[in-house]
């Protein structure tokens, strides 16, 4: 059902997708839909939770390995090494263009609907907290830490990534994923390097 919803939402948008279109795509009945979800919005929240979990799991499987080179130097790693690690982290990410479109659409829906907003907001905050904890643990394992609160920095980085992806989509980039990586690599390595220090 979630896979069918993803396909339909990507093709037609949230408002343009009917419950019947989702159940037909999934090969289920309308009754089967309502035995699992109270509404189309609840289905999308479940889809958002799945996509965020997928991204965290992809990072968690390889994050320590990718960050490990930062611990092989004495003192603070150089900017070039930080740049290589960030490039490797970005390469772990799944395709984000379609998900950015859907998340942007649903964020607007959540801002307009006070019944949807709290769960959407908590979903977003949970993702950012878990990502910040993962980054903290990985940096600690190589003797580093951020000089500012990791939660605030993680939110800044996630917002920046979404903004750059939205701009690439608006600009009609043929390969939005590559355009986003190129843009982020021009700014993020210097920012992360300047905000990282050796743990005392």
Image (cartoon, helix red, strand yellow):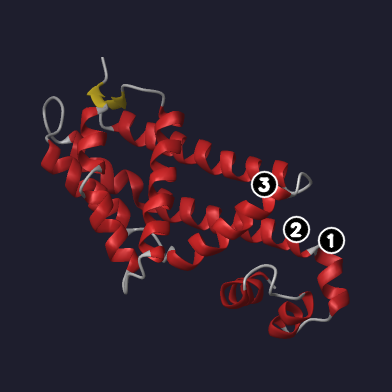
* Direction from residue 82 to residue 40 in the image, left or right: right
User: What SS does tag 1 mark?
Assistant: loop
Q: Which residue is denoted by mark 1 in the rendering?
A: 38
- Asked whether disc 1 touches disc 3, contact meaning CB atoms under 8 Å apart, the reply is no
Task: Mark 1 or mark 3: name the one nearer the start of the chain.
Answer: 1
Please tell me whether residue 166 is drawn above or below residue 200 in the rendered image.
Answer: below
Which quadrant is home to the C terminus?
top left
User: What SS does tag 2 mark?
Assistant: helix
**Whole-Å distance between the Cαs marked 1 and 3?**
20 Å
User: In the rendering, at what x and y percent does residue 88 appear?
Assistant: 25, 54
* Direction from residue 129 to residue 112 in the image, left or right: right
User: In the rendering, at what x and y percent does residue 1 appear?
Assistant: 70, 73
- The residue at the point 83 percent across, 81 percent down is 29
Q: Residue 182: which disc?
A: none
User: In the rendering, at what x and y percent does residue 132 appear?
Assistant: 44, 35
Using the image as rendered, state which of residue 13 and residue 171 is in the foreground. Answer: 171
- Asked whether disc 3 touches disc 2, contact meaning CB atoms under 8 Å apart, the reply is no
- Asked whether disc 2 touches disc 1, contact meaning CB atoms under 8 Å apart, the reply is yes
User: What SS does tag 3 mark?
Assistant: helix
Residue, far front: 171
Using the image as rendered, state which of residue 150 and residue 164 is in the foreground. Answer: 164
Dot 2 crowding, Cα within 10 Å, few <14, some 14–19, many 20+: some
Please tell me whether residue 61 is drawn above or below residue 102 in the rendered image.
Answer: above
Q: Which residue is denoted by mark 3 in the rendering?
A: 111
Q: Which residue is denoted by mark 2 in the rendering?
A: 42
- Asked whether the viewer can see residue 70, the reply is yes
- The residue at the point 20 percent across, 34 percent down is 71
């Amino acid at each position: 059902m979630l896979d069918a919803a993803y396909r339909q939402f990507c093709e037609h948008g949230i408002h343009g997708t009917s419950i019947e279109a989702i159940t037909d795509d999934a090969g289920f009945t309308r009754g089967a839909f309502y035995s699992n979800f109270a509404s189309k919005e609840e289905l999308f929240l479940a889809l958002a939770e799945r996509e965020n979990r997928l991204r965290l799991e992809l990072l968690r499987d390889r994050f320590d390995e990718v960050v490990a080179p930062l611990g092989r130097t004495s003192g603070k790693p150089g900017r070039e090494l930080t740049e290589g690690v960030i490039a490797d982290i970005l390469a772990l990410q799944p395709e984000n263009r379609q998900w950015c479109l859907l998340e942007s659409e649903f964020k607007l829906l959540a801002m307009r609907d006070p019944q949807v907003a709290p769960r959407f907001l908590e979903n977003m905050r949970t993702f950012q907290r878990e990502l910040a904890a993962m980054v903290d643990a990985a940096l600690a394992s190589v003797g580093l830490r951020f000089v500012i609160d990791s939660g605030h920095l993680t939110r800044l980085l996630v917002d920046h990534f979404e903004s750059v992806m939205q701009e690439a989509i608006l600009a009609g980039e043929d390969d939005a994923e590559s355009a986003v990586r190129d843009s982020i690599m021009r700014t993020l390595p210097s920012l992360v390097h300047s905000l990282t220090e050796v743990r005392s």
